[in-house]
Image: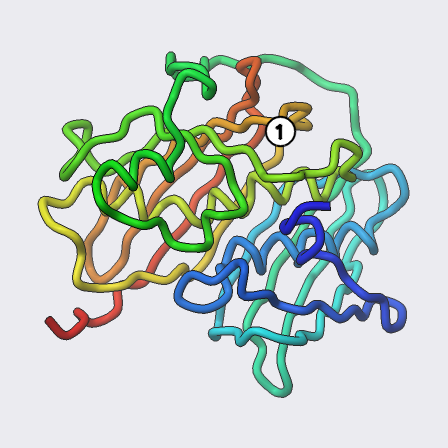
Amino acid sequence: MGLFATHTTLEARSEGRFLATLDRAFEIWGPNGGYLSAIALRAAGHMAPDGHRPASITVQYPARADFGPAEVEVERLKGGSAALLAVTMRQGDRRFLTAQVWTTDRSQGPEHQSIVMPDVPAPEDLPSLQERAASAGRTPNPFWAGFDARPTDWTEGRNPAGPQTRQWFRYRDFPSDADPYLDAGRALLLIDTLVWPAHNRGLDAPARYLAPSLDVAAWFHQPAASEWLLLDVAAERAAGGLIHGTARVWSRDGRLVASGASGLAVLPPRPA
């Protein structure tokens, strides 16, 4: 298994209680929020009714986590064909994540997709993030080592299109037989992570402030069934000390796999 599958694995302790180990491979200002959310989603999958798949997740980050062991608790609030589960993650007395996860086994209903995937080059026709960064004399954050990332709209300096980014992503060594919760976690991690880079691409100069996530929400429309995922992310609004953005996740064959949104809180500027 690759880094993502390995480091989101949970150890069962008792009914609804698990142990996770937060790994530095997913470090951005501490444990990455999307990484924590993916662990919570996998924990919900362990307690969901048989035959269910994830439908949606909403996550709040009330405190910062540390690397190392973390307790995960899952409570089933509602059963049936649409089940609701509550997830809490904590270290000692500090609760650093709460989440609500809907799962379902429903399959009947209307089917349509009224939007189309952006017209972008195929991933194999694009240089990697590492190659782009090297040509600009920069080194990507080690976080990105677990991905094969291919930006479709790379620019030096401010993006003429504004605060948005479109990138192909492939998780390195991702298992082909991943369960639905691990598979959906791929999209969830990137939805949470990419609003900040999208915001930065709309700036004339690199930000001197940080903006960690307050929350993230995602809706899972259908299984990816695709090694590559296209992330189309825009940070549409920044005001009042908050940054908000939305994301769409597409499969290689143009299916909308997931969509979501994230809110970030701006911290004071870093010293010059």
Q: In the image, is residue 268 above or below residue 148? A: below
Pick the front one: 79 or 131 = 131
| Residue 207 in the image, given as x and y percentages of width and height | 18, 56
| Residue 206 in the image, given as x and y percentages of width and height | 16, 52
Point 31% across, 46% down: residue: 197
| Residue 23 in the image, given as x and y percentages of width and height | 59, 65
Residue 51 lies left or right of residue 117; in this view the side is right
| Residue 33 in the image, given as x and y percentages of width and height | 50, 59
- Amino acid type, mark 1: His
Pick the front one: 51 or 122 = 122
**The C terminus - image quarter:** bottom left
Q: In the image, is residue 1 above or below residue 62? A: above
Pick the front one: 171 or 210 = 171
Q: How is the image coloured?
A: rainbow
Few, some or many C-alpha atoms within 10 Å of disc 1 (few <14, some 14-19, many ≥20)? some
Residue 46 lies left or right of residue 34; in this view the side is right
Residue that badge 1 annotates? 221
